[in-house]
Amino acid sequence: MAANIKVALVHDYLREYGDAERVLQVIHRLYPDAPLYTAFVDYQHLGTEAKRFASWDIRTTFAQKLPGIAHPHRWRGLLPYLWENIDLSEFDLVISSSGDFVSKSVLTRAETLHVSYCHTPPRHLWERLRSHSQSLRWYDTWLDSRLRQYDFYASQRVDRYITSSHTAARRISKFYNLTAEVIPPPIKVHGEGQVGDRYYLYVGKLTRQMQVDLVVRACTQLDRPLWIVGTGHDAEYLDSLRSLAGPEVKFLGEAPEDALPSLYAEAKALVFPCSSADFSREAVEAMGHGIPVIASQQSGLREVVLDYRTGLLFPQPTVESLVDALKEFEGLRFSSAACIERAEEFAESVFVDRLQWFIAQALDAHHAIGVETERDSFA
């Protein structure tokens, strides 16, 4: 890579420290001098996590001054104006980290290489959940239709796509008619540990989309101990989970990262019931502690969990299917060494090596196309 190349990073917004922000953080370590362009930063919602970005050169859009920053999707109709007003003309390489807020739609010069780590095409536009679609007003339906058109045409501006899994790559192919290189997100792998025998473990958000009720119902039906780590903002759903839970189900709330190793140490398995997930950091982290994973075969975790080697995949997103998987799991034995070995394939160092190689190849190809075009213009 040329020594004097100018790089800019683009990210949807900074409101929480989630999986997308963890990927962004690793990319920023590769380009520490690159400014970060983002729609807005919600420092109040970030709380103590804001310190992770304290030394960064962060440049927000005019959305930073808009009211209702806690509910950004209320003004999602402004997305084209947010991103297209950013001036990236001075940069040779732009790396966007894009998901629901379509930051990949920034405008760049023909000479600039734009690589997008597309976590997913916006699900609220392309794969609206049935429970949400029934409550949409006519204005929302009309706006989503316009934004789908915009998202498609804006997607064509990107030179190269990267995504987290083949499941996500198929979505990019279907909705954008484009190909994406699969480079799974970087995970900090513990690298040691043994399978415990006290409880099943769930780690993640407590939301309807994550289908946490499946594992609560299954463990309650089998009278198996289940420890749940995580929180959610849907009070109605949280109440329903607690009402479904039997006496062996414990809700631990949010746990700091340094507390997770002790939780993994006594777990029989991590159960990840979500059938729509493209990837799961928690699943890889569990395997990195030597813990097998029970996950939905319909999710992207079929690319992560080696069935009958580092865990089990259950075929249907139903309580009955998960109950059968738990019963079968208890009659099998899994190698912690095999789990750790598999997790190491998703280590941060692997991500960095693959990303640097991909960008170097893309820059060379982009430069070669530019030289060839210039030569043709003088022919």
Image (spheres, rainbow, N blue to C red):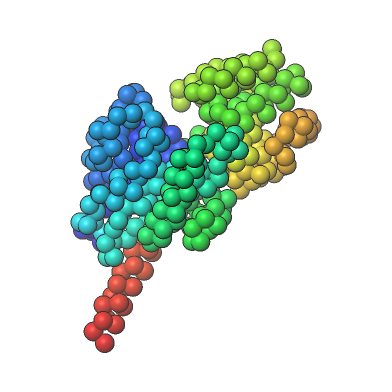
* Residue 64 percent coordinates (x, y): 27, 34
Judge from the rendering whether residue 13 lies leftward or rightward of residue 19; answer left or right.
Answer: left
Q: In the figure, residue 283 lies in which quadrant? A: top right
Q: Relative to the observer, which residue lies in front, 214 or 305?
A: 214
Q: Residue furthest top?
A: 247
* Residue 54 percent coordinates (x, y): 26, 32
Q: Relative to the observer, which residue lies in front, 115 or 294?
A: 115
Q: Residue furthest bottom?
A: 379
- Residue at image location 62% in from the left, 16% down from the top: 242
Say if 372 sits above or below 210 in the image.
below
* Residue 140 percent coordinates (x, y): 46, 40
Judge from the rendering whether residue 95 lies leftward or rightward of residue 277; answer left or right.
Answer: left
- Quadrant location of the C terminus? bottom left
Say if 254 sits above or below 350 in the image.
above
Say if 89 sits above or below 32 in the image.
below
Q: Relative to the observer, which residue lies in front, 285 or 84?
A: 84
* Residue 57 percent coordinates (x, y): 23, 40
Say if 366 sits above or below 173 in the image.
below
- Residue at image location 46% in from the left, 45% down from the top: 142
Q: Relative to the observer, which residue lies in front, 17 or 345?
A: 17
- Residue at image location 49% in from the left, 21% down from the top: 254
Judge from the rendering whether residue 202 lies leftward or rightward of residue 32; answer left or right.
Answer: right
Q: Specify whether residue 47 is in view.
A: yes
- Residue at image location 22% in from the left, 57% down from the top: 89
- Quadrant location of the N terminus? bottom left
